[in-house]
């Protein structure tokens, strides 16, 4: 599009130069004729100049050239205006796409930096402000909803439930009019591992949502989906890790039967201390894992040393 605009501008410049040159020539010719008439200078005795047909043809040709240049200039001006409008539309589309991508990137940062519940609340609250909506919600087995200040949350929740039902029926992003009160909602299905788990939506009491806003909500929905999938993966990994830890602890306890209650008790005390200090659940879980693994080094110690009935020698302690 940029090259087309350059060509049009170059063509307009060429037409302007031709038009200006012709105008100058005509002005000079008229001025010369006026000068000859005022000074009484006789016109050159050319037979063609005395020919009526020749004078008519020349005059007509000049008029045709002038009209052609004027028509080309008008068409070219129209093409320039159309190209300018296309550039403006492209600029608007690019700005809108950038805005959607920037907000979805911010939503991804929020979802990864906070626990899922906290991150979801923040994303919904910021979506209300970003899209100019009156409420935002994720509807699944439970409903997580955030409403703008002064908005009746029960009214918003009822509208979002209706929008979620219509979206689940359609199985695709939808725009749902509430009917009686004139409000409107847009909603996007959330699929986790291919299964429709819940719906994210925006609700507005007045005004309609644009297609760009629906696309923007779709990007936010993808971020929420990834957060839910990551949550499931983390839960699975933790389950596998817990089984592995239990097996390793059992190996340690098998080597030292009198050590059986030690690791679970240390893990319990460490978790309780972390909770009392106000640590998050993820942090206390990591502390519990570390406490369970504190004596894992015993697996590398020979049983003759672990179960020695007497004090260890200096060489054995090395």
Image: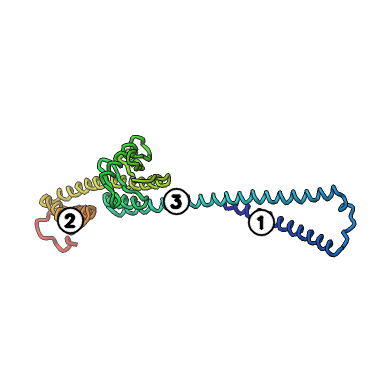
Relative placement, left or right, of 149 versus 247 is: right
Label 3 environment density (alpha carbons within 10 Å; few <14, some 14–19, many ≥20)? some
Q: Which mark is residue 275?
A: 2
| Residue 146 percent location from the top left of the image | 28, 49
Q: Nearer the viewer, residue 237 or 172?
A: 172
Task: Name the residue furthest bottom.
Answer: 39
The reply to whether residue 281 is in sight is yes
CA–CA distance in space, label 2 to label 3? 45 Å
Which of the two labelled residues, at mark 2 and mark 3, occupies the earlier sequence position?
Answer: 3
Q: Secondary structure at mark 1?
A: helix
Whole-number angstrom distance, CA of label 1 to CA of label 2: 77 Å
Q: Is residue 2 left or right of residue 60?
A: left
The local secondary structure at tag 2 comes to helix
Q: Residue at x 71, y 58 (%)?
A: 20
Q: Position of residue 59 (x, y in %)?
A: 79, 50
Which of the numbered marks, if any, corresponds to residue 301? none
Kindly identify which residue carries mark 1: 13
> Would you say the residues marked 1 and 3 are in contact, meaning their CB atoms lie under 8 Å apart?
no
Of the image marks 1 and 2, the number of the one nearer the N terminus: 1
The tag earlier along the polypeptide, 1 or 3, is: 1
Residue 252 in the image, given as x and y percentages of width and height:
17, 50
């Amino acid at each position: 599009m940029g090259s087309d605009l350059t060509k049009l501008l170059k063509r307009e410049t060429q037409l302007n130069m031709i038009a200006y040159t012709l105008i100058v020539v005509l002005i000079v010719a008229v001025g010369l004729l006026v000068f000859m008439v005022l000074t009484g200078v006789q016109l050159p005795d050319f037979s063609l100049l005395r020919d009526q047909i020749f004078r008519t043809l020349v005059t007509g040709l000049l008029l045709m050239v002038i009209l052609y240049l004027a028509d080309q200039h008008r068409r070219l001006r129209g093409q320039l205006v159309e190209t300018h409008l296309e550039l403006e539309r492209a600029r608007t589309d690019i700005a809108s796409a950038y805005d959607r991508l920037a907000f979805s990137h911010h939503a991804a940062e929020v979802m990864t930096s906070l626990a899922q519940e906290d991150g979801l609340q923040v994303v919904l609250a910021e979506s209300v402000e970003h899209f100019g909506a009156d409420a935002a919600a994720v509807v699944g087995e439970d409903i997580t909803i955030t409403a703008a200040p002064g908005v009746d949350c029960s009214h918003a929740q009822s509208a979002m439930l209706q929008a979620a039902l219509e979206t689940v029926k359609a199985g695709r992003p939808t725009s749902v009019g509430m009917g009686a009160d004139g409000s409107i909602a847009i909603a996007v299905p959330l699929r986790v591992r291919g299964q429709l788990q819940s719906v994210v939506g925006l609700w507005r009491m007045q005004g309609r949502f644009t297609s760009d806003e629906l696309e923007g909500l779709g990007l936010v929905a993808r971020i929420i989906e990834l957060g839910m999938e990551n949550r499931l993966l983390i839960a699975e990994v933790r389950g596998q890790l817990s089984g592995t830890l239990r097996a390793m602890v059992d190996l340690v306890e098998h080597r030292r039967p009198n050590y059986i209650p030690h690791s679970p008790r240390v893990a319990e005390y460490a978790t309780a201390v972390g909770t009392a200090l106000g640590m998050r659940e993820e942090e206390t879980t990591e502390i519990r894992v570390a406490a369970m693994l504190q004596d894992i080094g015993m697996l590398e110690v020979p049983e003759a040393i672990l179960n020695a009935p007497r004090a260890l020698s200096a060489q054995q302690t090395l």
